[in-house]
Image (cartoon, rainbow, N blue to C red):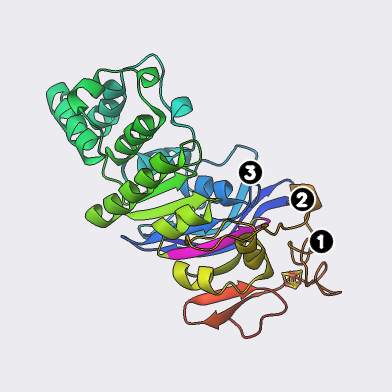
Amino acid sequence: MIEAKEITVRFGAAAALRDVSLDLAPGRRLGVVGESGCGKSMLGLALMGMLPDAARLSGSLSVDGKEMAMASDRDWRALRARRVAMIFQEPLAALNPLRRVGETVMEPLRRHLGLDRDAARARALDLFEETGIQDPAAKLRQYPHELSGGQRQRVLIALALACDPGLLIADEPTTALDAHVGLRITDLLVRLARDRGMALMFISHDLAAVARTAEDLVVMYGGEIVERGATAEVLADPQHPYTQGLLAARPPLAAGHLRERLAVIPGTVPGLMHLPEGCRFSGRCAVEMAHCATVRPLERATGPFRSAACHLIGGER
Ligand code: SF4
């Protein structure tokens, strides 16, 4: 469904994404992890054709076999209307506070699918049921502020599904929710992707949420993919020093043993203008070598369907 080859997004001289390549097939669930500022959301926006005006994109981006890297706004709008959809971290900000949520969900059904009012209402009701909204007929008539955070996120998911997209990009969809509600949302996304044969890109800094949601995983740092593979394999045996640091800095994924103190990755993600030319993780890496800051490591195979970009790792990808 999506084939991105060496996507680079520049703001002037600074590259917010550098040579990002990935494939996403129908029905696959891909997790994208990394700290804030690592390029996860920028990647989601690039795949939606929603980059800021100042951004310059290069590389190849094919959606359903159609090259979109240089597509017009009009082509992107048509694609977003029917094939790719996105949900965001804060559903309250994404919903019109002056509109009943049922009207919001009915609007794309009428505009893009040409349904009349009764048919759009019936379809919105189905979508509310499919996304697990309790008492859906009553909820259709409510305003966003009358719903809980979890209910609002379900409304946004229903809105995203309205035109039956082939790809749903979920950008930190559980971050603003409490842990229990967040778990229910991740389970809902997995079920919807399975039932609909829909590709899901799940962007999160929360490794536990990604482990629950995604079959495949890419780890991003400094606007690059530094490691990729099957989620279970990467989490069980991280090979890139950044992935190892991320895993050491999060609570255990499985209950039963608690570390007394979590490790931290020293420093913070540098701003765009201050990223090293070589390995972008240099400056924070515990096993850095003399040439790391100036010589860029290539992404190399570390096993079937696994790779990482680090000078300590050998073998071409
Ligand atoms: Fe660390 Fe060097 Fe590997 Fe980068 S290339 S992750 S700085 S060892």
Q: Is residue 245 left or right of residue 128?
A: right
> In the rendered structure, does residue 285 fall within the stretch colored magenta?
no
Q: Is mark 1 within 8 Å of ligand 1?
A: yes
Helix, strand or loop status at disc 1: loop
- Distance Cα–Cα, label 3 vs label 2: 19 Å
- Distance Cα–Cα, label 1 vs label 3: 27 Å
Residue extent of the magenta highlight = 216-222
Asked if 51 appears above or below 284 in the picture, the reply is above
Q: Main secondary structure of the magenta part?
A: strand
* Label 3 Cα neighbours within 10 Å, binned few <14 / some 14-19 / many ≥20: some
Q: Residue at x 22, y 54 (%)?
A: 195
Q: Which residue is tagged 1?
A: 283
> In the rendered structure, does residue 218 fall within the stretch colored magenta?
yes
* Residue 115 seen by the camera: no
Q: Position of residue 131 (x, y in %)?
A: 26, 39
The residue under label 1 is which amino acid type?
Gly
